Amino acid sequence: MDLAVIFSERKEYTVTEPLKIRLEQGIHEIVGDHLGRMNVTCSHITFVGKGKDRTTIRGGLSVENQQNVAFEELSITNLRGFGYGLLLQGSETTVDVLTCVVKECGGFGMAVGGGATVTATQCEFMENGGNGVLCRDTNTKVRLNDCKMYHNRYDGLVAFNHAVVDLHGTKTDIHSNKGRGIRADNRAKVNIHLPSQHNTSHDNVGDDRNQEAMYGAAPGSIANINADGTFTHVVVEEVNY
């Protein structure tokens, strides 16, 4: 990361010509704080591995108010404390995650907040100690294309506090989580761009779909968006604590 900052100072990288950091096969250990995290401190940078089964980053990656950051063909795991895999936040943040696995993190797999914009494609979020994917805050926009969230300790996908999540792709699969499959709370929206008969969320210990109204807040929304532009909501469930 230190070298990347130096390169960025010497040359202007762009959306079409980002700085590429190529990681070889094997395990790459992050030396950071007690949560084992590294902050990505420059924009227009791509981290590319040799494949999610061949290149592993051991530690968490954080992006805050950086643009055009990408992670490709990697496995990310962070076993330190309640450590996360990916923490992506800030209104200026734009991140793409492509063909990655985020697994066995002490806390959540991927968390997005503070108005960040994130797209994950053909990724898996599995066996994490918290939620698979957590999205929060106004103006936060997350698109998940053909992603899978399973065997997490709590929920597979959580959206709350006005965040908007769009699910695309027939390979989308949220299952076997020890909590709920999809949870939407406090005016968050989860839009499923798949037919209502698609088995998007199934076989979770808790509800497969849950729209909560916790602590007096408004419930969230989970809806299938049909090809003709109409949508189908599930029934709102009021939860009292």
Image (tube, helix red, strand yellow):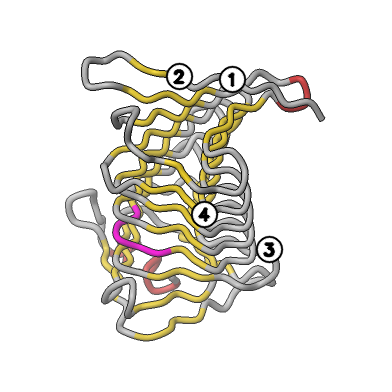
Vertically, is 224 above or below 94? above
Cα distance between the residues tagged 4 and 3: 21 Å
Is most of the magenta stretch helix, strand or loop? strand
Q: Which residue is mark 4?
A: 176
Q: Position of residue 217 (x, y in %)?
A: 71, 21
Q: Amino acid at mark 3?
A: Phe
Residue at horizontal 63 percent and vertical 24 percent from the top: 186
Q: Amino acid at mark 2?
A: His
Residue 236: which numbered mark, if any?
1
Mark 4 or mark 3: name the one nearer the start of the chain.
Answer: 3
Contact (CB < 8 A) between labels 2 and 3? Answer: no
Residue with the most extreme right position: 241
Residue 233: which numbered mark, if any?
2
Cα distance between the residues tagged 2 and 4: 22 Å
The range drawn in magenta is 97-101
**Secondary element at tag 2:** strand
Residue with the most extreme left position: 16
The C terminus - image quarter: top right
Q: Which residue is mark 3?
A: 82
Q: Residue 239: name its quadrant.
A: top right
